[in-house]
Image (cartoon, coloured by chain):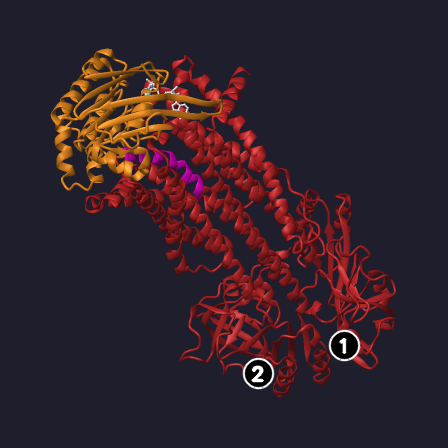
Chain colours: A orange, B red
Amino acid sequence: MTRSHISETPTSLIEVRQLGKTVNTATGPIHILTDINLRINAGESLAIIGTSGSGKSTLLGLLAGLDLPSQGEVFIQQHALTTMDEDARAELRNQLIGFVFQAFQLLPGLTALENVMLPLELSHRADAEVVAAALLQRVGLGNRLTHTPKQLSGGEQQRVALARAFVTQPRILFADEPTGNLDRKTGAHIIDLLFELNAEQQTTLILVTHDVQLAQRCQHTITLEGGCML
Amino acid sequence: MKALALAFKLLFRDYRSGELSLLFLALIIAVTSVTAISLLADRLQQTMVTQAAEFLAADLVVNSTTPISADIVQMATGLNLQQAQSIEFTSVIMENEQLLLAGVKAVSNNYPLRGQLKTSLSDYATEQIQAHGPERNTVWVEKRILSALNLKLGEQLRIGEKALTISHVLTYEPDKRGDLYSLSPRAMLNTEDLAATQVIQPGSHIHYFWQFAGAPEALAQFKQQLKPLLNPSQKLMDIHEDRPEIGGALQRAERYLGLSSIVIVLIAGVTIAMSTRRYSERHLDTAALLRCLGSTQAQILTLFTWQIILLGVLASSVGCGLGWLLQDFLLHLLASLLPQKIAAPSLLSIVFGLLMGIIILLGFALPPLLQLRKVSALRVLRRDLEPLPASAWLVYGLAISLLSVLIWQYTHDLRMTATIGLSGVAGFVLLYALAYGLLTLLKPLLPKLSLAWRLSLQNLVQERSTSISQILAFSMALMVMQLSYTVKSDLIDNWQQQLPVQAPNHFALNIFPEQVHSVEQDIQLATQGNSHFYPIVRGRLTAINDVAVQRYVTKDSQGQQATERDLSLTWSESLPPDNTLVSGNWWQDKREGVVSVEQKLAENLGIKMGDRLTFTVGSEQFTAQVSSLRQVHWETMQPNFYMIFAPGNLERFAHTFLTSFYLAPAQKAFLNTLVKNYPSITVLEVDQILAQLKTILTQLTTTINYLFSLGVLAGFTVLFAAITASLDQRKHKSAIMRTLGANSRLLNTIHCIEFAGLGLISGILAVCLAESVTWVLYHFVMHLEYHSRVLLWVLIPLSASGVIAAAGYFGLLKVSQTTPMQILRSL
Ligand SMILES: Nc1ncnc2c1ncn2[C@@H]1O[C@H](COP(=O)(O)OP(=O)(O)OP(=O)(O)O)[C@@H](O)[C@H]1O
Ligand SMILES: [Mg+2]
C-alpha cells in the first residue's frame, strides 16, 4: 500500500479506493474487479458501461453494500462498508440507498402496494400506506395497487420496483440495467420516469447500462473492461 | 435409444451442477426406509406364521373324535405333505397306591412336525431339546406325575395294561392346549404302544389330531380339497381359534406390521413427491428451452421420462441396498428375541422399494411437465401456467392407484389398505379445506399485527397453495408419527393387561363349600397372595324366550358348543375386574331372576337385553331375565363365565368353587400338598402356556418398538424434505428484504413465526386426522378400544411448532450471515 488511506476521511458521498473482487472457483481464482477508484458527490449521476461480463453488476453490488470486496474499501457518507456488519449495512441501505434490479425482484406473495410499502415499514413509518400509494399513483399504477407481480407486465413490474426504490427518498439510487428486460419503448418510458423522480428527489444516481445514449444523460461515465476502469 | 443417451447426458450434467443431490437424497432415504420395512415386515410375518405353526406342532391340523379316512391320508401323501398323529385322552393312573388323573398323549414317530419338545433328566439338569417324542416302551411324564405317584426316572409306569419305562421328564410341548384334556399332568408315549395299553375302547372319549406340514401351495391345495371331506365331528384347526390367547396377539402384531409398512410407504411417497415437484419445476425452463430449440412436446416428454427412469433406477437401487443392510442390522438387534430361523424374504418385498420409487417419481415428476403441452415457451419461462390438464390428474391418479394396489398386494390386507386409503383420502380433502379455511380466516387479521407477524403471516396467506402443500406434508408426517405411537402404545398396553406380572397361573376346581375356608388358608400360606373363589353350578341353557335353544344355534358355532354341554353358572356381587359392561346395569334393585350374559355368546345366540333365559340344573328348571351384557377378555386366561347371576338365585343348587392363584416355579410342590389334602380337587396348570405367551408378547413388543422408530425416522425425513423444499423461495425473499434494509433479527423472527405457524396448524390438523384414522382403524380393523389421549392434543401441535421452527431457523441461519448478492447469485 502506497497511501494510508484509512486515516484520510473521505469527503465525497461515495468514495471507492483500490477496490478488488476475486472469487474462487473450481478452476482457480477469478479476478472480477481490480483496482477501482471512484468519487461521487451528492446529487451527481454516474453511468457505468462496459461489455457483458466486465464486472458492472459486481461493482454496483459492492457500492451498495450488497456484497463484500476482496480488497479495498467503499465509503458511503464517511462510513466504511467493510467495517460494518451485515445488519448495519442493511440499516444504512434502508436509510440512504434505493436499488433497482435488472430482474425486478419483487416479492411474489405481496401486492404492488405491499411491495412498495415494505421499505417504509422496515423503518417503522406509520404513513407507509399513504406514501406508497401516492408514489404508485405517480408512476401510473394507481389502479393496480392490489395486484400481485404475476398479474403485472414486465414494464409495470419495473415501475413498481422504481416506486419501491424511491419511496424512502434515498440519497443514492443504484439501478442495474433497469430496462434490460424490457422492450425499447417501455424501457424509454421507465428511464424517463427514473430521471424525473431523480430530479424531483435530488437523488445521487448510479446507473449500469450498455446503452451509450442513456449513459450520456448522466453527468459522468466510467467504462469497465475485464474488471478494470478504462 | 438416442433419447436415452441424451437423457443420460443431461442427467449427468444436472448431477454435476448439484441440481440432483436433494432429490437423489430424498429418493434414497425413502426407498431405503420402504425397503427396510417391507423386508423386515415380510420376514417377521413369515416368521410369525412359522411360529404360529409351532403352537399347532404342524402347519395344518385336523381334530377328530374318530380316525380320519384313508382317502385324506392318501391325498396328503400325494401332495408330498409330511404327516404325524397324536391321540389324546384322560386316564387314571395308579402306582404306589396313589391315584392320578393324567392327560395321556400318544404321538407318532415324526411328531412334532413344527417346533420341538423339551425334556430334562432331573430337577436340576438343564433342558434338552428333543426333535421327536418317546421311543417304544418308554414314557415321558411331567414332573408332577413323578411326585404325585412317588416315582423316579427309570421306574415303570403302567398305562392301562402296558408297563412303560419312564425315560424323560417332559418340560415343554409346543401344542399344549388350554383345555381340560391337556391340563391334567401329561404322560406321553409312542402310538405304537397304544394298542397294548388297551385303554381305547369303543365309546372312549378320545381326540385324534392329524397333523400336516409342507409347502404353502401344497397346503393350500390340500386344505381346499380337504374341507368338503370332513364330517361334523372333524374340525380344521387354526391358531386363531385354537389358541386365541396367542392367535389374537399374533394377528394384531401382523396388523401393526402392515400398518407400519403402509404408513412408511405413504410417507416415503410424500417425500419423493415433494422433492420431485421441486425438481421438475426447476426443469420447466430446460423444457421450455428445448421447445425453443425445436423439440416437440413428445420428444421432451420421452427425454424427461427416460431421465426420471434412469434417476429412479439409480437412486432406488442404492436405496434398496441400504434398506437391505438396515433390515439385516435390525434383525441382528432382535436376534436374541426371535426364533433362530428367520424366514427368507419374498421377491416382491425385495423389489418393492424399487418399484415404488420409480412409480412415485414418474407419477409426480411428469404432471408438471405435461402442463407445458399447450403453453408457449415464453409463458413457461414467465411461469404463467394454466391449471393442470386432465392428463396430469390422470397420471397422479394412476400413480396413487398403482401405489395402493402395490400396498395391498404386498400386505395382503385389503381391509387395512382400504381403511387407511379411504380415511386417508377423506382426511386429505378435509385437511386441505381446513388449511384453506384457516389461512383465509387469518387474512382480515393481518393489518392489526406488528411488522414481523404481519410479514410472516402474509407470506403464509398470500402464497396459499405453497403453504397448503407444506402443511399437508407436515401433517402427513406428524400424523404418521402419532398414529404409529398411539397404535403401538395401545397394543403394548393391551398385551400387558393380558399378562400382568404374577397373573394367576394355576386353577383349582371342584372345591366343596366346606373346603373353601381351609383351601383359602392353604393357598394364602403357600403363595402369600389372596385368591378369589367363584361358586360354580353346572347347568344348561335350554330355552330363550321359551323357544328351545336349538332353534337359535348355527352349526359349529360358539353357541352350539356352549349349549351342547353344561355351562359353569356362577353368581357374584360385583362385576369381575376383567369384565366390562356393554349394555345394561350391574345388579340394582331387581336382583331376583336376573342374569348377565357374555356379549359374544349373546350375539351368537341372538340374546338381547330383557330376554327370558331358561336353565336346567339337575332336574330343575328356572328362568332368568337378561339384565346386562358383558365383554370378557378370554385371552387373559383367567376364570371367566358366560353367565353370571345376582347373588341369591343359585345358592339352593349343589355347587362347588373354583379359584386361581399364582405359583412361582419353585413353589410347584404345593400342588402335591393340595391334591393330597383335598383329593377331590382338580388342579389345572396354565403356567407353561402363560410363559409361552409371555415370550411371544415380549418379542412382539420389541419388534413393534423398532418398527415405530423406523416410522418416526421416516416422519422426520418428510419434515426435513418439506422444509428444504421451501428454503430456496425463502432465501430469495430474505435477500430482497435485506437489500431493502431488513436486519437479521427481523428476518429470523419472520422465519420463526412462519415455520412455527406452519407447524402449529399442521400439528392441529395432524392430531385430528390421526385420531380419526385411529378410531376407524380400531373400530373396523384392529378391534382395540379407542380412547383419546388428551396430552397428545396439546403436545403434538406444540412440539411440531417448535421442531419445525427450529429446523427452519437453522436452515435459514446462513442467509443472515451471507451477503444478499451471494444469495441471489446462488439461486
Ligand atoms: N460468484 C461468482 N462466481 C464466479 N464467477 C462470478 C461470480 N460472480 C461474478 N462472476 C463472474 O464475474 C464476471 C462479472 O460479472 P457481472 O455480473 O458483474 O458482469 P456484468 O458486467 O454485470 O455483465 P452483464 O452486462 O452481462 O450483466 C462474470 O464473468 C461472472 O461470470
Ligand atoms: Mg449485470
* Prevailing secondary structure of the magenta residues: helix
Residue B653: which disc? 2
Task: Name the subunit of mark 1.
Answer: B
Instruction: Report whether the residue tagged 1 is closer than 8 Å to ligand 1.
Output: no
User: Left or right of B200: which side holds A55?
Assistant: left
Q: Nearer the viewer, residue A71 or B102?
A: A71
Q: Residue at x 59, y 74 (%)?
A: B568
Residue B52 colored in magenta in the image: no
> With respect to residue B435, does A80 lie above or below?
above
User: Left or right of A130: which side holds B187?
Assistant: right
> With respect to residue A96, does B9 lie above or below?
above
Secondary structure state at the residue bearing disc 1: strand
Range shown magenta: B719-740
**What residue sits right under mark 1 in the picture?**
B100
Q: Is residue B279 visible?
A: yes
Q: Is residue B379 visible?
A: no
Percent coordinates x, y for residue A90 in the rendering: 27, 36
Percent coordinates x, y for residue B214 in the rendering: 73, 47
Q: Residue at x 13, y 39 (%)?
A: A127
| Quarter of the figure that contains the N terminus of chain B | top right
Which amino acid type is shown beneath numbered disc 2?
Phe
> How far apart, in angstroms, are the residues tagged by discs 2 and 1?
28 Å
| Quadrant in the rendering for residue B315 | top right
Task: Name the subunit of mark 2.
Answer: B
Residue B732 colored in magenta in the image: yes
